[in-house]
Structures are given as C-alpha cells and as structure tokens.
C-alpha cells in the first residue's frame, strides 16, 4: 500500500507539472509499478523523480523523462512500437499498456544481463505483448518493421538511418541526440522520402548508446 500511495503522489505531481497529459499514458503510470523494475537497494527511491542505477552502469530513467518522451511518442491502441535500449524494462512496460492487447512493443538491448533483467521484470507484471531482443539497437529490427513509432533511450550522435527506414511515414521517433555527455531530446516525425520534421524537447543526459550507431561505432561517421 505504501508503494501505491507513493506512485499516485508521483503521478499527481507529474500531471500538475503538465508533464503527463494524455489519459492512457497517465493510466499506464498508475498501473505499471516502477518498484518492480528497480534493484532491491533502490526500492526506497522507486517513486522519487530521479534516475536510478540498475545493472552494468545502466539506469532506469527519471519518471518525468519517461513521461516527456512517452507523451512525445503518443503511442496509440494497436500500435507497433520499437524501443532501442531496454534497460530495466519499465519504459517498455509503459508502452505495453499504451498500445494495449492488440499492439506490440519490440525492445532491443545490447547487454545480455540487462536483457535477462528486463525479461524477469516484465514477467513480474504479466506483460505478454513485449518482445525483448538481444542485439544492436541502432540497427533496429527489420523482421518486425515497419513501426508506428520508435523511442531511443540511450544517447546517440544522430538518429540511426535503419531506425528511420523502419519507421512508417507519419511515424514518430523520439531520441536523445548530442554528445556522450549532453543531449537534446528530439521528436522527429517521418515525412515522405525519409525526411524528418524535428522538434526540440529540451536538454537531457542519457547513458551513451553502444553498437553500430553509438559513440564507438563506425556507423556514426
């Protein structure tokens, strides 16, 4: 019950600050228990609006950041969403609720330990419409393309071209773009011929992406 009260208080604060606005996304934040996605030592801080360490120098994102990015993505009932950077699985769980039983979330994580961590966490809450893939997220996941939207939860120098290609026309891509130390979260709406209409959502700091289009990958050049 204590966790439930804390969760409601957090959501109410995010609503009052104007960060959470969409009914279904608000419901997702109320229904998906963040404390089941953090490590035991971080349980006292599960509903504090801060990023928390998990495994392998990774973090579970700050709730307000997840809210801002999810609101920008605007996942709808029945959508198929691609997530790059599974982490703890909490963002995927939020998206899972938003797209509903007829929708699907494909989430890719480069670190095997985090893949297992996320799968266990998603199983705790009985989520069945999320597929966790172990792989290089910058390459997307062609097998399930095209996607209605994509969310990237690790810092990258630019939006990886495979992600743009695998997103539908009029689909949304939300990603932190910049250096390994500071980024701007960008909402990019894909127009015809792969052109992107971009909106800057502000400054953030994310864990750097690894792989082909990360800061050490050849694909970033």
Image (tube, rainbow, N blue to C red):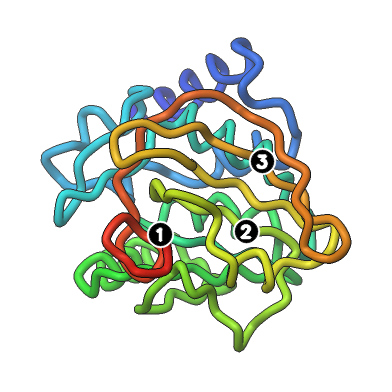
Q: Give how far across and how far down residue 127 sits, in percent.
A: 51, 67
Q: Is residue 115 above or below residue 18?
A: below
Q: Which residue is mark 1?
A: 85
Q: Which residue is mark 3?
A: 187
Q: Kindly indicate whether the residue at mark 2 contacts the one at mark 1 (C-beta within 8 angstroms).
A: no
C-alpha gap between disc 1 and disc 2 = 11 Å
C-alpha gap between disc 3 and disc 2 = 10 Å
- What secondary structure is found at the residue carrying circle 3? strand
Quadrant where the N terminus lies? top left
Q: Residue at x 25, y 36 (%)?
A: 52
C-alpha gap between disc 1 and disc 3 = 17 Å
- What secondary structure is found at the residue carrying circle 2? strand
Neighbourhood count class around disc 2 (C-alpha, 10 Å): few under 14, some 14–19, many 20 upward: many
Q: Give how far across and how far down residue 221 sits, in percent.
A: 42, 61
Taking 72 as reference, is 56 left or right? left
Q: Residue at x 75, y 50 (%)?
A: 196
Q: Which residue is mark 2?
A: 150
Number of labels in the image equals: 3
Q: Earlier in the sequence, mark 1 or mark 2?
A: 1
Residue furthest toward the front?
221
């Amino acid at each position: 019950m204590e966790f439930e009260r804390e969760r409601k208080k957090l959501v109410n604060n995010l609503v009052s600050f104007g960060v959470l606005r969409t009914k279904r996304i608000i419901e997702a934040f109320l229904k998906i228990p963040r404390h089941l996605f953090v490590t035991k030592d971080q349980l006292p801080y599960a509903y504090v609006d801060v990023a928390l360490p998990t495994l392998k120098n990774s973090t579970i994102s700050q709730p307000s950041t997840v809210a801002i990015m999810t609101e920008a993505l605007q996942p709808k009932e029945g959508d198929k969403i691609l997530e790059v950077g599974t982490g703890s699985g909490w963002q995927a769980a939020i998206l899972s609720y938003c797209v509903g039983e007829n929708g699907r979330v494909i989430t890719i994580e480069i670190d095997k330990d985090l893949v297992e961590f996320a799968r266990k966490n998603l199983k705790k809450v009985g989520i069945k419409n999320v597929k966790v893939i172990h792989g290089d997220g910058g390459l997307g996941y062609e097998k399930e393309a095209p996607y209605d939207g994509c969310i990237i939860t690790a810092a990258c120098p630019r939006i990886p071209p495979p992600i743009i290609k695998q997103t539908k026309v009029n689909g949304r891509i939300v990603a932190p773009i910049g250096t390994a130390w500071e980024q701007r979260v960008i909402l990019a709406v894909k127009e015809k011929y792969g052109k992107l209409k971009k909106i800057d959502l502000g400054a953030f700091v994310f864990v750097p992406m690894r792989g082909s289009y990360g800061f050490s990958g050849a694909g970033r050049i």
